[in-house]
Amino acid sequence: MFVKLAAIAALTLTAVTPSSAQMDGSAGQWRCRHANQTISNNPFETWMYEFQLNLGGHGGFRAQGTYTAMTAGFGVAFQAQGRWQQSSEGIMVQGTEQRSDGTQMRFLLVFTSISPDVISNRYQSPNGILVTHCER
């Protein structure tokens, strides 16, 4: 799934180095949910993140919260950090995630809907729906 997201992100956003002025509006603290559900309700591919996201004014980010897989039925704490960038087409957040169970993996979020108090994205494929929603 993360490989698909990387491909979508590469096609969706133009890789640019944002100016401080571009990033000022989106920088700051956000409360987020990031969830995936398959059309078939496959429990091995249904999961959700709930977390605090801090988009730093100079392009760095930190996230901390809980990852819950439907198959496990309980949350695992995680932290992520890396870089974020904004273009006229949206925001891309990418870095490394470390879970309390020792799992380490790529962390990637894409936001195509941006307002002062909400950043979000909804991607639907024939296999399911991926939704990310953050509020101030």
Image: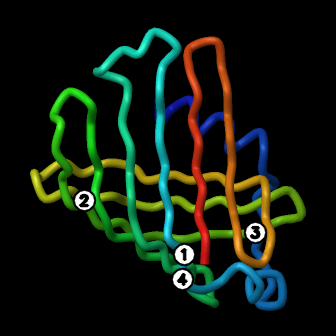
Q: Is 91 situated above or below 110?
A: below
In the rendered image, which residue does mark 1 sit on? 30
- Residue 117 position in % (x across, y down): 71, 75
- Which one is in front, 28 or 104? 28
In the rendered image, which residue does mark 4 sit on? 29
Amino acid type at circle 4 is Gln
User: What residue is drawn where x is 47% and y is 27%?
Assistant: 37
SS at mark 2 in the image: strand
- Which one is in front, 110 or 14? 110
Q: Earlier in the sequence, mark 3 or mark 1?
A: 1
User: What residue is drawn where x is 52% and y is 14%?
Assistant: 39
- Which one is in front, 59 or 132? 132
Q: Nearer the viewer, mark 2 or mark 4?
A: 4
Question: Residue 18 got which mark?
Answer: none
Within 10 Å of disc 3 (Cα), the crowding (few <14, some 14-19, many 20+) is: many
In the rendered image, which residue does mark 3 sit on? 86
Amino acid type at circle 1 is Trp
Check whether the beta carbons of the residues at disc 3 and disc 4 lie within 8 A of each other.
Answer: no
Within 10 Å of disc 1 (Cα), the crowding (few <14, some 14-19, many 20+) is: many
Where residue 87 sits, quadrant-wise, is bottom right
Check whether the beta carbons of the residues at disc 2 and disc 3 lie within 8 A of each other.
Answer: no
- Residue 76 position in % (x across, y down): 18, 53
Left or right: residue 123 versus residue 100 is: right
SS at mark 1 in the image: strand
User: What residue is drawn where x is 59% and y is 86%?
Assistant: 28
Report the Cα–Cα distance between label 3 and label 1: 16 Å
